[in-house]
Image (cartoon, rainbow, N blue to C red):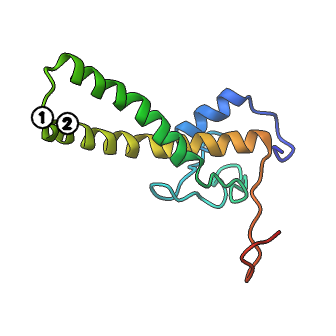
Amino acid sequence: MNGGRARVELWTALLRGWRGRCPRCGAGALFDGFLKMTNQCTRCALVLQPFRADDAPAYFTILVVGHIVVPMVLLLERYGQQPPLWFHALLWLPLSVVLALYLLPHIKGSVIALLWVHGIQGSKPSAGSVDPS
């Protein structure tokens, strides 16, 4: 799981992933771009490619953004004398987009770190096959 090195605690790995760092050493970058994972850590040579987050980061990001924005919308509706729809759109749409763009790489890094800690590797689909099973 850890490639023969000292075991890393779950919360340490999650925090390193949240910061966009290698879950094992905490020094190497986890991403090449905004969301593109590196193939391996430049510092400790941990191969990161097998740890595929797939749709989990998007799902968790939507869950978190929804739990932040929806109560604020309801509070504004209740105590803000029911502002017009254009005001809601002008306020909540940019806030939701900015919040999602901020959280998505952090959540993806944490998911990758969680997968690494538990040794959960994704399988690569076979070439030329629609369903590998």
Q: Is 42 or 92 nearer to us in this picture?
A: 92
Under mark 2, the amino acid is His
Q: Which residue is mark 1?
A: 84
Q: Which residue is the extreme one toward the right?
A: 4
**Residue toward you, 108 or 65:** 65
Q: Residue at x 35, y 24 (%)?
A: 71
**Residue under pointer 2:** 88
Q: Position of residue 104 (x, y in %)?
A: 47, 45
Q: Look at the image and tell me in which quarter the C terminus lies.
A: bottom right
Would you say 89 lies left or right of 100 here? left
Q: Nearer the viewer, residue 38 or 91?
A: 91
* Apparent side of residue 4 relative to residue 93 in the rendered image (left or right): right
Kind of residue at disc 1: Pro
Find out whether the residues at labels 2 and 1 contact each other: C-beta distance under 8 Å: yes
Q: Secondary structure at mark 1?
A: loop
Q: Is residue 8 placed above or below 111 in the rendered structure?
A: above
Image location (x, y in percent) of residue 82:
16, 25
Q: Residue at x 17, y 41 (%)?
A: 90
**Residue 23 seen in render:** no
